[in-house]
Image: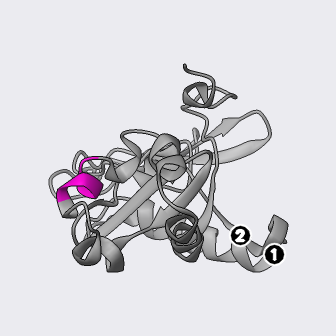
């Protein structure tokens, strides 16, 4: 478990050594009027611009982000009650154990369906994690298949600060 180290006030002087190895150093910087935390933990792979968190247990930056996200969700009145996920979060769901697809701005959790898919699990797995928009795949299916897609819809794609305002792939022909 690491330690959170905040920079001392500018008028503070000490000969005490600063912590070194195995320490998560978290500092705050002001971005406009928003305080954001910068994590210097080299094993943290989370996007610093959105609610994405790494899978490292004990990553203090991501623990704080998760707690803040829970608070936001309690206060947030999302449209139609749908959750919103950034591509940074979606990319973490590209395995057989957790498989999410993106189609036309919606997110689908197809983890429970992979074994049953008539086209085989690999046809789903190669597009999981948002690596490709599956809108054409959705259009390809029968009406029964399209209804099944709706059953697995869990939310909408939300842009994080690392992405452009438009989902460019929606306009790609």
Can the viewer see residue 148? yes
Secondary structure of the residue carrying tag 2 is: loop
Characterize the local packing of mark 1: few (<14), some (14-19) or many (20 or more) Cα atoms within 10 angstroms: few
Q: Which residue is mark 1?
A: 75
Q: Where residue 99 sits: x, y (%)?
A: 33, 64
Task: Point out the frontmost of discs 1 and 2.
Answer: 2
Instruction: Name the mark on residue 82.
Output: 2
Apparent side of residue 3 relative to residue 143 in the rendered image (left or right): left
Instruction: Look at the image and give the residue range highlighted in magenta.
Output: 122-126
Apparent side of residue 36 relative to residue 89 in the rendered image (left or right): right
Residue under the point 27% across and 71% down: 114
Q: Where residue 92 sits: x, y (%)?
A: 34, 56
Closer-to-camera residue (135/62)? 135
In this rendering, the answer to whether 125 lies above or below 72 is above
Q: Where residue 93 sits: x, y (%)?
A: 34, 60
**Quarter location, residue 106:** bottom right
In this rendering, the answer to whether 118 lies above or below 7 is below
Quarter that holds the C terminus: top right
């Amino acid at each position: 478990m690491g330690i959170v180290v905040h920079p001392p006030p500018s008028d503070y002087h000490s000969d005490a050594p600063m912590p070194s190895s195995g320490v998560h150093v978290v500092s705050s910087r002001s971005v406009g009027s928003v305080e954001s935390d910068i994590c210097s933990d080299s094993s943290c792979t989370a996007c610093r611009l959105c609610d994405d968190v790494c899978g490292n247990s004990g990553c203090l930056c991501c623990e704080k982000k998760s707690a803040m996200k829970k608070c936001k969700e309690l206060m947030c009145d999302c449209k139609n009650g749908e959750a919103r996920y950034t591509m940074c979060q979606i990319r973490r769901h590209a395995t057989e154990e957790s498989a999410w697809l993106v189609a036309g701005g919606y997110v689908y959790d197809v983890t429970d369906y992979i074994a049953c898919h008539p086209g085989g699990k690999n046809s789903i797995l190669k597009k999981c994690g948002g690596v490709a928009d599956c809108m054409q795949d959705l259009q390809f299916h029968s009406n029964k298949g399209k209804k099944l897609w709706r059953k697995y819809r869990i939310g909408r794609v939300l842009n994080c600060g690392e992405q452009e305002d438009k989902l460019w792939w929606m306009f790609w022909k």
